[in-house]
Structure formats: C-alpha cells, structure tokens
Amino acid sequence: MKGLNIVNGKFQKDGVFVPVEFGNKEQMAALENTEKRHTSFKNGLELNYTTEVNVIYSTVFKCLCGSSIHLNSEDDTEDDPSCLLGIEKCYSCNQSYQVYKDGFKLMVRLA
Ligand SMILES: [Zn+2]
C-alpha cells in the first residue's frame, strides 16, 4: 500500500514505521482519516459484493491500517452472500472484523 497509514497505532509510510512529528500535516490527515474510518467501522459499513455467473461471491474492504481484506466464496452451490459472513482478520495488523447481514445488505464492523 502507498502513502501513510496507521498500523498498530504507529505511522507507517510505504511499509516502514516513521516517528510521530508534531505539526506534520500528512500525519494529521492520516490520523483524521483513520479516525473517520474507525467510526464508520464501529457503526457498520456496507460492503458491495459481486457475483458471477457460476455464483462466486467476492468483496473487498480496506482495513484501518490500509491493507485490503479480500473475501471470496468459491463454493458455487451458494446462492446467497451469507457464505461471506464471519470473522475476518487483517494479516498486517491483526484487527478483527465481523462481516454480517443487515436485511439484504452485507456489512462489516469491528469485531
Ligand atoms: Zn490491518
């Protein structure tokens, strides 16, 4: 991932941890952005999923640390995105997410 992210509470730029600098605009923007995304994850964020002819569901969302979390169901007997539900962990920062359904919507929130 490109740019500045916050991984396990530390600033990480292009994969390298960088120290906190007061007044650093890029860090402040990253902090604000992470804060906003944290709030939306707390409230539940709707996921857009795609499905193909042979009924394979897949979706992707971005972890708070900036890593992409991909969900796939390769079971072609599934006819509902419920096959994507469950707890997912980010491989980069270990944050857990719960994928759940709200009516017909597929949602994700902090687990
Ligand atoms: Zn992460």
Image (cartoon, rainbow, N blue to C red):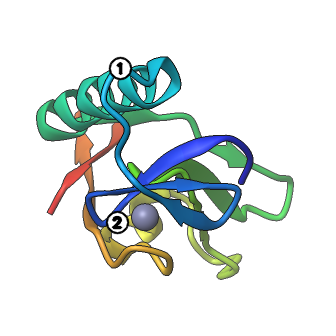
Decide: is 59 above or below 91: above
Dot placed on the residue nearer the N-terminal end, 1 or 2: 1
Name the disc covering residue 61, or none.
none
For label 2, the SS is loop
Q: Is residue 104 visible?
A: no
Give how far across and how far down residue 96 sits, in percent. Answer: 26, 70
Q: Is residue 84 visible?
A: yes
Name the disc covering residue 85, or none.
2
Residues packed near mark 1 inside 10 Å, few (<14), some (14 to 19) or many (20 plus): few
State the CA–CA distance, disc 1 to disc 2.
Answer: 41 Å
Q: In the orientation shown, which residue stands out farthest toward the right? A: 53
Query: Hey, what amino acid is under mark 2?
Result: Leu
* Residue highlighted by disc 1: 23
Specify the quadrant that holds the C terminus: bottom left
Give how far across and how far down residue 16 sits, in percent. Answer: 61, 67
Decide: is 76 above or below 38: below
Q: Nearer the viewer, residue 70 or 21?
A: 21
Decide: is 108 above or below 10: above
User: Could you tell me which residue is drawn at 45 percent across and 70 percent down?
Assistant: 83
